[in-house]
Image (tube, coloured by chain):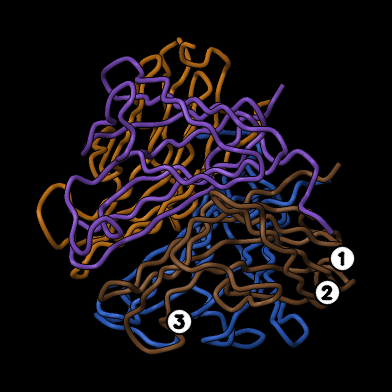
Chain colours: A purple, B orange, C blue, D brown
Amino acid sequence: MSHPRTLIGVTTWVIADGYIPPTSTGRQPAMTSHDSVCMLNAGDTDAEIELHIYLTDAEPLGPYRLRIGARRAFHQRFNDLSDPEPVPVDTDYCCVIRSSVPIVVQHTRLDSRQAANALMTTIAHPVPDQ
Amino acid sequence: MSHPRTLIGVTTWVIADGYIPPTSTGRQPAMTSHDSVCMLNAGDTDAEIELHIYLTDAEPLGPYRLRIGARRAFHQRFNDLSDPEPVPVDTDYCCVIRSSVPIVVQHTRLDSRQAANALMTTIAHPVPDQ
Amino acid sequence: MSHPRTLIGVTTWVIADGYIPPTSTGRQPAMTSHDSVCMLNAGDTDAEIELHIYLTDAEPLGPYRLRIGARRAFHQRFNDLSDPEPVPVDTDYCCVIRSSVPIVVQHTRLDSRQAANALMTTIAHPVPDQ
Amino acid sequence: MSHPRTLIGVTTWVIADGYIPPTSTGRQPAMTSHDSVCMLNAGDTDAEIELHIYLTDAEPLGPYRLRIGARRAFHQRFNDLSDPEPVPVDTDYCCVIRSSVPIVVQHTRLDSRQAANALMTTIAHPVPDQ
């Protein structure tokens, strides 16, 4: 059986607890504190992705544009986004992810501010397509 | 492309594992043990939020009222709520979040009772709007 | 505004990664390694709960019966269940939670086998009511 | 009341943040860093499972085939898959899980690269059956 041909996922996803811890302990860059958006494009068409970053007291940042090839995984650290501007560190945010084709999104943070790293993850909130 | 104009989320969400750890290790307030409700109001209308706290052996507390501006993130530590009364520490609780407009909610705890902090997160349970 | 009167949740939920770590570090019982099912009965009727524990190579255990009062939170450590029999420690399991009325379920583990505790949580999988 | 007879779950699930940490601290194999797919087959028919692993810059791996008996839990470490080939360590991936009958899937990682283990978990993303 080949890989699944049905469309998997939806085109809009939400992360509500975005936060990049400002400090790190341990070997870099593996143990650098980071906040990540992990995406699967299981379809046979490339995905054009746009991220918007929502803040507590300013208008949203973005769009941040990414492309994910057909049948590809893509894990993006928010720390590493720079265009149109870096995502602010040590700052509460939320993120809306929109894709040109259905994808699946999971949100993960590694926090190594203290001597042993902490991890958290959740499947992001899928917004039903119309 | 500007930020998404469609309504994102639902108006009622549930957190079932609420708990504020009673002690902390490390730099305050960043590493203070806390339980948080993280919310996105991606719409163009302010959100009026009400939280109710459910306990094991007493009637629910609340409402706790919050306002989230249009196109804004809002991360609230349960530790910091005080009106109508503080959320009890070291006590099991659940929380129902209701909003005047669709939002998305994620629940996160940082537990620094021991020498290195632990983290956990989950998108809260969305209650379908009628 | 009083607490929500609408029915919140569904009557059947699933936890797929059940596991009680066999050892603990730190102050007991707060830091005892445990696996918990956290439930909200937001309605105005008591909930009669039945848990079944599924194992890798034996028939399911249970039912384990619990009652949650109207408008009450209830956090149950699997470690503390004893009737009809204890949930085996250091053993992979899954759990199906069924309730007489809609509830919301979250699954949380605290693992203190090593020197600092780890945490993980997720809203359980809601099975749509017919 | 016997165990639930209704079909529980769906036949396709997605994990978007797959990653096997390359190093470990502590007693083996319990504290070996691992990434796991935890599944429940609550039905009365055996489940034939196929996993596909999606990578960042190569075609998907698989299928990896597993069988889960009726009324059984099954927790599989990705580390331990070897047929048709091992899942690469220290490499971002996503996973699509397909089953011949409805199941429920939860994704968990234990990361013991640093001195105390970290944990993260989430119910995987359920793809609605047609």
Labels 3, 1: one chain? no
Amino acid, disc 1: Arg
Q: Is residue D3 left or right of residue D119?
A: right
Amino acid, disc 2: Ser
Of labels 2 and 1, the one closer to you: 1
Amino acid, disc 3: Pro
**Residue displayed at 78% across by 49% down:** A4
In the image, which disc is placed on residue D5? 1
Q: Is residue B7 left or right of residue C2?
A: right
Give the vertical position of D35 relative to B72 (above or below). Answer: below
The residue pinned by badge 2 equals D2
Within 10 angstroms of label 2, few (less than 14), some, or many (20 or more) residues? few
Is disc 2 placed on a helix, strand or loop? loop
Q: Where residue B69 sits in the image (x, y, percent)?
A: 35, 16
Q: Are marks 3 and 2 in contact (CB under 8 Å)?
A: no
Labels 2, 1: one chain? yes
Labels 3, 2: one chain? no
Is disc 1 placed on a helix, strand or loop? loop
Of labels 3 and 1, the one closer to you: 3
Within 10 angstroms of label 3, few (less than 14), some, or many (20 or more) residues? many
Q: Where residue A76 sits in the image (x, y, percent)?
A: 42, 42
The residue pinned by badge 3 equals C21
Q: Nearer the viewer, residue C42 or D102?
A: D102
**Residue displayed at 33% across by 55% down:** A110
In the rendered structure, the residue with mark 3 lies on which chain? Answer: C
In the image, which disc is placed on residue A48? none
Q: Is residue A110 left or right of residue A38?
A: left
Q: Are marks 3 and 1 in contact (CB under 8 Å)?
A: no
